[in-house]
Amino acid sequence: MKILIPNTCYEDNFEDNVAYTLRKMGHEVLTMPASPHIFNDKARHILKQVEDRLFPNRFSIQEKWLLKVYKSFKPDIVLCLTQALHEEVLLELHQQKIITICWWGDTAANMTKQGLLCYGWDFIFIKDQFAEQKLRSLDLNAHYLPEAMNPDWHTWCFDHTGSGILFAGNTYDYRHFLLRKLIATGKYQIDLYGNKPPRWAAPDIQSVYKNKYIVKKEKSLAFGNALACINSTAMSEFDSLNCRAFELAGAGGLQILEYRPAVEELFEPGTEILVYNSFNELTSILDRLITDRDAFHAVRIAGHRRASQEHTYAHRLTTMLNHLA
């Protein structure tokens, strides 16, 4: 099939993983080319917020590109990834008999304006089952579909375990305070990767930041080499798992995640993933690892096996495309 993704692929982002996997599955995929950046990410974010306030109904750059190229590309499917479209755009695609799909890989709380709550979507896939039920209550064709990992990039590639407690991603609310509490104990080597911490972050957070954004095999190597990887999420995440949960497992990282019921549907706690319900539970796990770094090696193996067998992008996209049959 011909699949058009109206957004840009950056190395190892959601769009990159999906486009890469669809091509491996034999589909023809077109994504939006990257444009030269005059401003940095923070400045672009501020400018977009100002533009949205001044011109709330203005089509995005991605929508303008989509409307420009779909007539020549003639896709069977327009697949949006954590991306909403204006209803007018969706209805125009419908007139051309193009199937419209959104796979929303973020927390539903991060939708803006009308989000996905409009006419024109043929299929909506979302990682939170409560959000799925909310959408279905309005007769939207919504389905539960968790995030995933790419076994070509998120793979077991380490040969030894270091001493660091790894965090990766943005430094927001819950993660920021958790980091501060762990640093305050003075017992652990903390390694923070990802985007630069915000300006409001505490000075001790800046001291553990590695000033590096890791992707693909380099990310997998860091996950595997770490003594443990704490997969903390923002307060808005609620009962769903982020993509890092599957990437960590694929890389053989020893993953520790704050408990939520959704974990039990995708991994077996204690066997394939470690969970905690309190700070004391978390530090008890870390203290045991300091004295016996191989204590939970079997968890790494089992989590890697589960992710490889059930939680790849190929598994998710096959499930998605089967709904079209």
Image (cartoon, grey):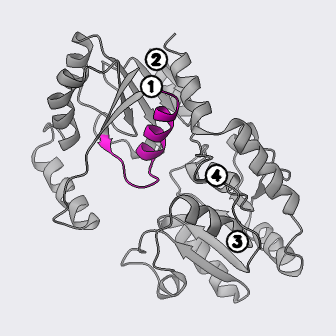
Q: Earlier in the sequence, mark 2 or mark 3?
A: 2
CA distance for labels 4 and 1: 22 Å
Q: Amino acid type of disc 1?
A: Ile
Measuring from the top left, give residue 252's x and y in whole percent: 73, 58
The residue carrying mark 1 is 124
Disc 3 element: helix
Q: What residue is rendered at 49% in x and 28% in y?
A: 125
For the record, the magenta segment spans 7-26
Q: Earlier in the sequence, mark 4 or mark 3?
A: 3
Measuring from the top left, give residue 316's x and y in whole percent: 58, 32
Q: Earlier in the sequence, mark 4 or mark 2?
A: 2
Disc 4 element: helix
Residue 18 included in the magenta stretch of the image: yes
The residue carrying mark 4 is 245
Disc 2 element: loop
Q: Are marks 4 and 1 in contact (CB under 8 Å)?
A: no
Camera-near label (4 vs 2) is 4
Circle 4 packing at 10 Å, graded few (<14), some (14-19), many (20+), is many
Circle 3 packing at 10 Å, graded few (<14), some (14-19), many (20+), is many
CA distance for labels 4 and 2: 26 Å
The residue carrying mark 3 is 225
Q: Earlier in the sequence, mark 2 or mark 1?
A: 1
